[in-house]
């Protein structure tokens, strides 16, 4: 089944919310993370998530939603994000961000591409493909850093957060269709 324009806007907007959340989380972590290497990678990726949020926000407007439309995800997914944000310790933060959040976001982007009509929604697909390339690079950079610094590869509380993300199949709160209006695919 192909997503309607409204469903695409809701999904893209929710993905924007997650990107903003990730950016803000990394920004909160930088001053409270003692390891310089972790600070550097978080700082670099703050900018990446900001770029993702900006591109997704512009796309929501093109899909007839508000500019930078960012609806909150479902309560369970939001709770998983909040649990991630609350982590302490460089290793737990690195592990949770790059072994849980980034792969989860990658899977959700990939699912969106599978659920949309790639021909009709090519602009969204192009934005997401660029974001996917950035996420792969972020993950690779984190793996390389943790190979050099084994102390930054700590599971701890990150394992519980991974379990929270795993059970969150639904993450988008779709708006109800407008009464009397036909939802269009294009």
Image (tube, rainbow, N blue to C red):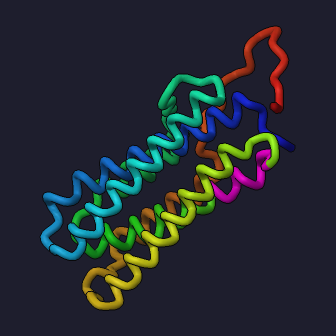
Our reading of the magenta stretch's main secondary structure is helix
Decide if residue 30 is on the left or right side of residue 70: left
Residue at 78 percent across and 32 percent down: it is: 4
117 in magenta? yes
Residue 6: x and y, percent?
70, 28
75 in magenta? no
Range drawn in magenta: 108-118
Residue at 50 percent across and 36 percent down: it is: 57
Q: Which residue lies furthest to the top in this view?
A: 180
Q: Using the image, determine if residue 153 lies above or below residue 38.
A: below
Q: Using the image, determine if residue 30 lies above or below residue 95.
A: above
Residue 104: x and y, percent?
55, 61
Residue at 65 percent across and 29 percent down: it is: 63
Report the number of numbered marks. Answer: 0
Q: Using the image, determine if residue 169 lies above or below residue 40.
A: above
Decide if residue 178 is on the left or right side of residue 170: right
Residue 98: x and y, percent?
42, 69
Residue 176: x and y, percent?
70, 22
Q: Which of 153 and 44 is in front in this view?
A: 44
Q: Quadrant of the N terminus?
A: top right
Residue at 23 percent across and 69 percent down: it is: 40
Q: Using the image, determine if residue 128 lies above or below residue 160.
A: above
Q: In which quarter of the image is the C terminus?
A: top right
């Amino acid at each position: 089944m192909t997503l309607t324009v409204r469903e695409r806007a809701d999904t893209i907007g929710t993905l924007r919310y997650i990107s903003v959340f990730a950016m803000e989380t990394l920004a909160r972590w930088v001053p409270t993370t003692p390891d310089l290497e972790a600070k550097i990678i978080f700082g670099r990726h703050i900018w990446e998530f900001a770029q993702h949020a900006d591109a997704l926000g512009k796309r929501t407007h093109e899909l007839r939603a508000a500019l930078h439309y960012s609806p909150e995800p479902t309560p369970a997914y939001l709770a998983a994000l909040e649990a991630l944000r609350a982590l302490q310790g460089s290793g737990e933060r690195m592990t949770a961000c790059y072994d849980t959040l980034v792969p989860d976001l990658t899977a959700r982007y990939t699912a969106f591409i599978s659920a949309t009509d790639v021909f009709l929604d090519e602009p969204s697909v192009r934005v997401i493909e660029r974001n996917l390339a950035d996420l792969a690079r972020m993950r690779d950079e984190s793996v390389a850093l943790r190979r050099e610094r084994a102390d930054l590869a700590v599971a701890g509380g990150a394992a519980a957060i991974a379990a929270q993300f795993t059970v969150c199949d639904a993450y988008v709160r779709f708006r109800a269709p407008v009464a009397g209006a036909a939802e269009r695919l294009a």
